[in-house]
Image (cartoon, grey):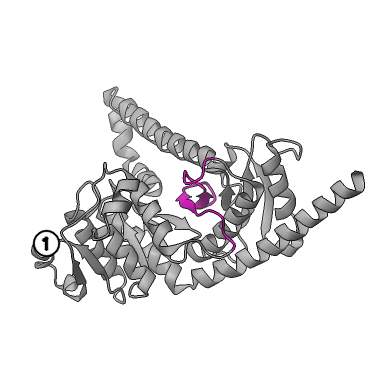
Amino acid sequence: MGGDDAPQCVISGTALAMQNDPDLRPILVGDENQLKPLMQNNPILHQAEILHTEDMVTSDEVPSQALRTGKNSSMRLAIDLVKSGEASAVVSAGNSGALMIMALMVLRTIEGIERPALAALFPTLNGPSCMLDLGANIDCSSTNLVQFAAMGDAFYRVIGKVDRPSIGLLNVGEEEQKGSASIREAAAILSDPAIQMNYAGFIEGDGIPMGEAQVIVCDGFSGNVALKTAEGTSKLIGTMIRNSFRATIFSRLGYILARRSFQQLRDMMNPQRYNGAVLLGLNGIVVKSHGGANQDGIANAIKVASDMHRHGFMDDLKNGIARSIDAIEVAQSEKMKSKEETS
C-alpha cells in the first residue's frame, strides 16, 4: 500500500516479477477491496495471496508514531510474516523511516551487529557497486564500519555474483594518514588477512563512479550525501543533454542519428534497474523500494529480495560477521597491549 502510485504500481510490478520468476509466491498485504479489482485482469496474479488489512502507514507519518499505532498496518503485518517464517523477505515502497524502525524492533539485529545499515547499488564504469551506509547511521565507529564491510561483502556476493568483491573505505584521500581515527582503525582491521575480505584500501568520491571498489563503506552522512549528489548530477547531465539537442536543427538531426546510442545510455543509467535498497544486519531480509518506482523498479526490488533468499544470504552474512568479530577482538586486544606497554 506504499509508494506514489500504490497499490496499482505495486500490483503491476508484482505481476512483472512473477512473469520473470514463475517460482515466486507473493503475499500482498493490504486492503483486499482495493487489491482484488486490480488483480482480476491478470491471470498470473491469481497465484498471489492477499493478507487483508485496511490500516496503512502514510508517507508523512512520524516513524515513532507508526511504531506505536501501526500494529495492524500493512507494513507491520508484512514484517511480522518474515518474523514468523511465513515469508522469506519483505519488500515495501512505503515510509522509509517507519520501515526501518518497525523492522528493527520486530526482527532485531543479528548477533554481533551493533547497527543495521542501508545498502544500494550504483552504476559505475566497471559494473554496479554497492554502497553502505546510505543514511541509517550518521556517526559510526571503526567497529560499525568493519561490520558494514562484512555485510556489504555478503550482499555483493549474492547480487553481483562475485566470489571476493573488492571493498573500499570512502575517505578524503588515499594516503594511510588521511581521515578520521575511526576510518583509519577500520582500515587496519580490514587489512588483516584473518578477516578474509578483499580490502582495496581508501577511495575518494571520484572513485565511486569509476568503479574503483565493488563495495564502498562509509558512515550514513557521507553515504547519503554521495547518493543524493549522484542522483542530482544524473538529472543535471540528462537535462543539459536534452537542452543541447533541442538548440538547433542540426543538433536535432544529430540526436536522430545517435538516438540508439542514447537509448542504450538511458538504459544503463535507468534508476529503476538499481531500485531496491536493503536494510542489512537484521534477522530477516528487508528491501526498501523507492516510493516513486514504476513497475520495473518494483519488480527489480522483488528480484533483489528473492535472490538474497535463494543464495543463502543470511547464513553467509552471519559467517562473515563471525570472522569480523574475531578480527576486531584481536585488533582491540593488541591495541590495549600496546597502550599498556607504552604506559
Estimate the x, y position of residue 243 in percent, counting from the top left. Answer: 31, 26
Within the image, what quadrant is residue 230 found in? top left
- Image quadrant holding the N terminus, namely bottom left
Estimate the x, y position of residue 218 in percent, counting from the top left. Answer: 57, 44
Estimate the x, y position of residue 215 in percent, counting from the top left. Answer: 57, 52
Most common secondary structure along the magenta stretch: loop
Within the image, what quadrant is residue 229 found in? top left
Q: Amino acid at mark 1?
A: Leu
Q: Tell me if I can see residue 246 in this picture.
A: yes
Picture layout, residue 101 above or below residue 29: above
Label 1: few (<14), some (14–19) or many (≥20) C-alpha neighbours in 10 Å: some
Spot the residue most to the front: 68
The range drawn in magenta is: 112-138
Estimate the x, y position of residue 238 in percent, counting from the top left. Answer: 36, 34
Spot the residue most to the top: 248
Question: Is residue 115 part of the magenta span, yes or no?
Answer: yes
Q: Tell me if I can see residue 88 in this picture.
A: no
